[in-house]
Image: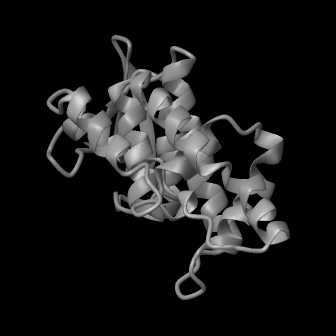
């Protein structure tokens, strides 16, 4: 049974009596009660695998393992470089007909504007938020998807997920529920830092 044990301002995640570690061997800890609850719920539901972002562990482990040692500026640059139509499918509008082009832009925005605003957005993010963006980028090959998702109201997320899914390659296309779970985890983790509850 997974549980969070609180002591001295820190939640330590246990399985039965064993304190859990990250893939790099660091203690699985956090300062946020909401994050601790979500970690224990997702560990119970999905196990300790750290590579599937339907689990919040896929967002938190990178911070614990790399957050203190990674260069923030290099991380930002690595993501900013990917904000281009060649490397980010959600910045490459493949349609020529006006109606389909406009439908695509309603989901993903105008390419040149998204690149400019997306890079400005990245410049303001913390290391934890940048690492969360990198999880979305690795999962869906798009920084723009993360940029758009971070600002979408919760009640509009399902419509955004449907738009993203409609434009993903048909082969190995995730279910709407899986994309929704990943986007919810990203928004939750991203906003922890924004709301002063991250840790």
How many numbered callouts? 0
Q: Quadrant of residue 147?
A: top right
Residue at 28% from the left image edge and 37% from the top image edge: 77
Q: Camera-side residue: 41 or 195?
A: 195
Residue at 20% from the left image edge and 37% from the top image edge: 66
Q: Camera-side residue: 125 or 14?
A: 125
Percent from the top left, x then y, of residue 127? 33, 28
Residue at 46% from the left image edge and 23% from the top image edge: 198
Q: Quadrant of residue 52?
A: bottom left
Left or right side of 119 for 184 = right
Q: Camera-side residue: 145 or 57?
A: 145
Left or right side of 186 for 106 = right
Percent from the top left, x then y, of residue 72? 25, 28
Residue at 78% from the left image edge and 74% from the top image edge: 97
Percent from the top left, x then y, of residue 108? 66, 54
Percent from the top left, x then y, of residue 187? 59, 39
Q: Is residue 14 something that shows in the picture?
A: no
């Amino acid at each position: 049974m997974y549980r969070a044990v609180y002591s001295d301002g820190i939640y330590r995640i246990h399985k039965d009596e064993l304190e859990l570690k990250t893939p790099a061997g660091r203690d699985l800890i956090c300062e946020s009660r909401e994050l601790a609850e979500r970690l224990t719920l997702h560990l119970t539901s999905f196990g300790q695998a750290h590579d599937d972002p339907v689990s919040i562990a896929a967002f938190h482990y990178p911070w614990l393992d790399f957050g203190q040692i990674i260069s923030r500026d290099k991380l930002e640059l690595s993501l900013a470089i990917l904000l281009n139509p060649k490397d980010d499918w959600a910045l490459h509008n493949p349609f020529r007909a006006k109606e389909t082009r406009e439908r695509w832009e309603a989901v993903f925005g105008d390419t040149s504007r998204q690149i400019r605003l997306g890079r400005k957005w990245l410049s303001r993010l913390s290391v934890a938020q940048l690492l969360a963006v990198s999880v979305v980028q690795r999962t869906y090959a798009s920084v723009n998807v993360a940029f758009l998702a971070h600002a979408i109201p919760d009640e509009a997320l399902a419509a955004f997920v449907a738009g993203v899914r409609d434009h993903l390659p048909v082969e190995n296309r995730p279910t709407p529920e899986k994309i929704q779970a990943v986007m919810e985890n990203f928004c939750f983790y991203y906003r922890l830092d924004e709301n002063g509850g991250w840790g």
